[in-house]
Amino acid sequence: MNLSGATGTGTASGESRSVTGDVGETAAFTATVDIAAADPRASMSFKRPHGRDDGRLLLADPIEVVISEPVTLVKLGAARVLANGKPLSGEFAMTSPVHGLVTHAAFLSREFAPSGATLTLDPAGLTNTNGHPIAWDGASMTTAADPGPLTANASFEHGLRGWQATGDARVTGAFGGVPPAAGTAQAVIDAGASLSGYLDVPSGATELAVSYAVFSEAGEFNANQSVVVALVAEDGSRTTVVDGAVERAHDERGEFEPGLRHRIGPRTARIDLTRHRGRRVTLTADVRSGNYLGLQSFALVLDDVRVR
C-alpha cells in the first residue's frame, strides 16, 4: 500500500498470525489509520558555525544550510545564496544523503562572499517530496568586516589588525616556552576560536611560510578535531597547512602552560603558492576541542606569516 501524498483518516484490515510452540493462531484485525500532511511551513535555514551563535561568518567559513524536510539535490539546485541581495556564484552539494534525499547541504561557492555583507536564502520554488513549498526561515547571516590584507600585520606586532577572529584569539609575547618567531608578539588561539586573514598573491610568489606551535591538554590529536590551519582559494578549494593529527609524531611532554602538557613545535610550515599567483587566498586557523576522555583543551601559536 502506497500512502505517499495521502492525507486524512481511513481503515486498514487484515490478519495477524502468532505461533507458540507447534500451535499457530490467526486473528482478523481492523485498524484506524490517521495520515497527516507534511508541515506546509517547512523551512530551510543557515547552519551556524560551531560555537558561534552571532550569525557571523569569517572569510573562509563554509556556508551550510539545514532543511526541515527531505529534498532532492535536483530541486535544491535551484536555491540560491544571496549576498546583499546578489546571488553568489556556486552550487549546493549534499551532506550525508539518504536514498538520494538530504536535509543538510553545503554551498560550494566559486568566490569569496564580500565582507560586511548580509547573507540570505532564496529557496526558488524548492519543495519537499510531497510537493509542499519550503520557505527560508528569515534568519540571515553576516560576513565579518574587511580587515584588510594580513600582509600589513603578518607578525602580529599590531595586535589582530588585518585578521578576522572569533572566540579567544589574542596577541601575546612568549607562550608555553615559545618566543615570537619575529618581533615581540605572536597570536595565541584557544580552543573554540578561529583566526582568518587574506592576501592577494603576487605574480612572482613561490611559497607561504608560517611559524606555529600546537599545545594540548592530553596529547590526543584527533583527525580534524584539534588544530587545523588551511589555505583556502576563491573557488573554495582547501589545502591543509597544519593538522595536529598529522603532526602528533612531534609531540613532546612538559608543563608548558596551565592545563597544557603536550606541545608540537615550534615549527615552520610551507605551502606552494605558484598556482595562486594573481589571486586572493585566505589563511584560516581553527582550534577545536576533542572528545578523548572527555573535553580537552588545545591552543595554537601562530606567527611570522611570510610570502616568498
Image: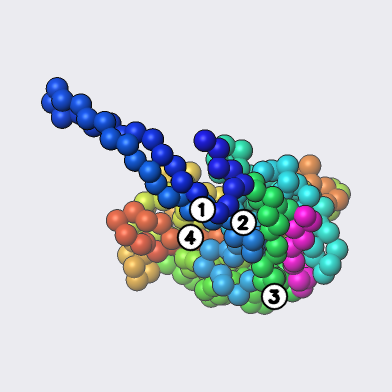
Position above or below: 154 against 161: above
Q: Nearer the viewer, mark 4 or mark 3?
A: 4
Q: Which mark is residue 69?
A: none
Locate residue 226, reporting x and y percent: 46, 55
* Element marked by disc 4: loop
Residue drawn at the location 32% of the way across and 65% of the way down: 255
Task: Tell me where residue 63 sits by quadrant.
Answer: bottom right
Q: Which residue is mark 1?
A: 9
Instruction: Give the mark nearer the N terminus: 4 vs 2.
Output: 2
Q: Which residue is mark 3?
A: 161
Q: Which residue is mark 2?
A: 67
Coloring scheme of the render? rainbow
Q: Which residue is mark 4?
A: 288
Locate residue 45, reporting x and y percent: 64, 63
The magenta span reads: 113-125
Q: Nearer the viewer, residue 176 or 84?
A: 84
Q: Nearer the viewer, mark 3 or mark 1?
A: 1
Instruction: Give the mark nearer the N terminus: 4 vs 3.
Output: 3
Q: Nearer the viewer, residue 266 or 68?
A: 68
* Element marked by disc 3: loop
Instruction: Give the mark nearer the N terminus: 3 vs 1.
Output: 1
Q: Nearer the viewer, mark 1 or mark 4?
A: 1
Name the amino acid type tagged 4.
Answer: Arg
The reply to whether the C-beta atoms of the residues labelled 1 and 4 are less than 8 Å apart is no
Asked if the stretch drawn in magenta spans residue 106, the answer is: no
Q: CA distance from mark 4 to mark 3?
A: 23 Å
Instruction: Give the mark nearer the N terminus: 2 vs 1.
Output: 1
Residue drawn at the location 56% of the way across and 72% of the way down: 53
Instruction: Give the mark nearer the N terminus: 1 vs 4.
Output: 1
Position above or below: 83 against 7: below
Task: Tell me where residue 165 sits by quadrant.
Answer: bottom right
Q: CA distance from mark 4 to mark 2?
A: 26 Å
